[in-house]
Image: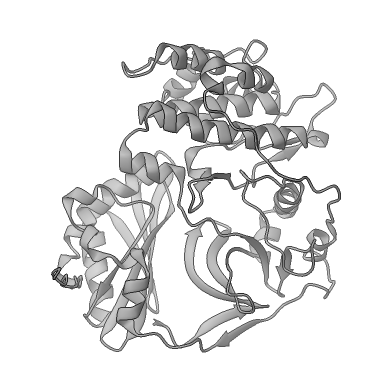
Amino acid sequence: MSTCGARTRVGKYELGRTLGEGSFAKVKFARDSRTGDGVAIKILDKSQVLKHKMVEQIKREISTMKLIKHPNVVQLHEVVGPTLYVMASKTKIYIVLEFVQGGELFDKIVDNGRLKEDEARRYFQQLINAVDYCHSRGVYHRDLKPENLLLDSFGVLKVSDFGLSTFSPQMREEGLLHTTCGTPNYVAPEVLNDKGYNGATSDIWSCGVILFVLIAGYLPFDEPNVTDLYKKIDRAEFSFPTWFSSCAKKFLKRILDPNPRTRITIPEILKDDWFKKGYKAPDFQEEEEVNLDDVDAVFSDSKEHLVMEKKQKPESMNAFALISQSSGFNLGNLFEQQAGVVKRETRFTSQRPANEIMSKIEEAAKPLGFNVQKHNYKMKLKGDQTGRKGHLSVATEVFEVAPTFHVVELRKTGGDTLEFQKFYKSFSTGLKDIVWIAEEIPEQ
C-alpha cells in the first residue's frame, strides 16, 4: 500500500501524486526541496522509448519546448543553471515542466457546457498568440485541442503537449509535411487526404475547431463512424447553433475553409474585427540562444545528468490538515447531482480497510465490462469494448494517510474523456458504501 511514510526523490525534487498517465509516460507533481516551488515532471521509461523507436520524437518534444519561450506556452523548468531542463537515471528520463494548476480548458467546457462569446474570444486570442509565435520559430504543433490547453491560477491559457510537433527542416522539398497525426475531430482535411500539408494552415484549422467548441459546447464534426467523420471534415460540413453572432459565424467560416490555399492566415486573423475586440498583444522577452546539450546527454552514456531515485520520509501531516489544504478532497461534490460530471481524475477518502476498498472497486467495475489487474494496492481497469479512442482504461490507487484513513485516486489513462464520465456515473453508485463524507461545521 502506498503510504505517506515513503516518498521518492529525484535530484532535488520530491515526487508527489500522478497528474496524468499515458502509454509511454507518466506526469507527476513534484516539489523543489530547496525552494518549495511546485513543478510537473514527465517521466519516461527508457526501455519503452527505445523499444518503440521514440528517441527522435522525445528529443523533438524537448527541443521544441526549449525553442518556445512564450507566456501562453507551458515552459520547461530549470534543473541546473539557466539552460538545463532534463535529467535521467539508468532506466528513466525526467522532463521538468512548469506546473499549471488551473486545469484543462476542456474541464471548463465540461463544467459550463459552453462559454460566452467574449470569454471564448479571450482564450482564442491567447491561443493565436501562442500558435503565431510557434510558427515564427518554425514549430507546428499538429495536435491542438482543448485537452492540450491548460489554464493557470490566473486563467491564462498555456499550450502544452508538443509530442507531435514538428520543425520546418522536417518538411520535404516542396515545403509540405506528410505525416498524418493529431486527434481526428480537430484535424484539417488536407492532413487526412495524405497529399502533403502546410503545418501552419493545418494548425489554424484546429484552432477554428477549438473556437467552435468553446462557443457551441460541442464539436462541429463528430460522427461515430470514422469514414463519415472524414467526409464531413473534407467538405467542412457543419452548422452553427442559434446563439453564434453573425460576426463569429463569418470569422469561423474563413478558418474552417476546407481549401488550405484560401483559408484565413494568422496575419489576417489579427486584423479581423471579431478577433480584435479587447485584444492584447503578448508582452515577453525572447531568448536568443538555446542549448540542446542535455537533450542528447540523456540518451547517451554520459553521466553528466544522471540522477538517482531515492526513497525518503517527508514531514508527517495530520489527515484532517491534508483535507483542509486540498480542494481535491472536498467530498461533498463527489456523488451529488449538482456537481455535474467528473473530469479525467478524481479522488475520495474512506475509513474502511484498504483490502475492502480494493474489493469494492473490483465489484463495481466488473459488471460494467471491465477487466481488472491488481498489483499491491494499485489497480488497472480496462474496458472490453473499443470506444472512440480505443479501450477505456482507468488507474486506481489507495494511499494510507493514517491507519484508519485512506485516500483513493481514480484517473483515466486511456480512451475518451466523455466515455470516462459516462462510465463513472454508473461506477460511483457502487462505491457509496465505502466513501467517507465529513460533516460540515454549521456557521455561528
**Could you tell me which quadrant the N terminus lies in?**
bottom left
Residue 329: x and y in percent read: 31, 67
The reply to whether residue 257 is visible in this rendering is no
Is 310 in front, or is 78?
78
| Residue at 85 percent of width and 47 percent of height | 288
Count of numbered labels shown in the rendering: 0
Residue 317: x and y in percent read: 40, 85
Left or right: residue 411 versus residue 159 is: left
The reply to whether residue 343 is visible in this rendering is yes
Q: Residue furthest front?
A: 444
Is 251 in front, or is 345?
251
Q: Is residue 226 above or below residue 62?
A: above
| Residue at 61 percent of width and 43 percent of height | 72
| Residue at 60 percent of width and 31 percent of height | 128
Left or right: residue 51 versus residue 126 is: right
Residue 26: x and y in percent read: 54, 62
Q: Is residue 165 above or below residue 430?
A: above
Colouring rule applied to residues: one colour
| Residue at 64 percent of width and 37 percent of height | 130
Left or right: residue 290 versus residue 5 is: right
**Could you tell me which quadrant the C terminus lies in?**
bottom left
Residue 222: x and y in percent read: 40, 27
Q: Is residue 307 above or below residue 285?
A: below
Is 260 in front, or is 286?
286
Is 375 in front, or is 174?
174
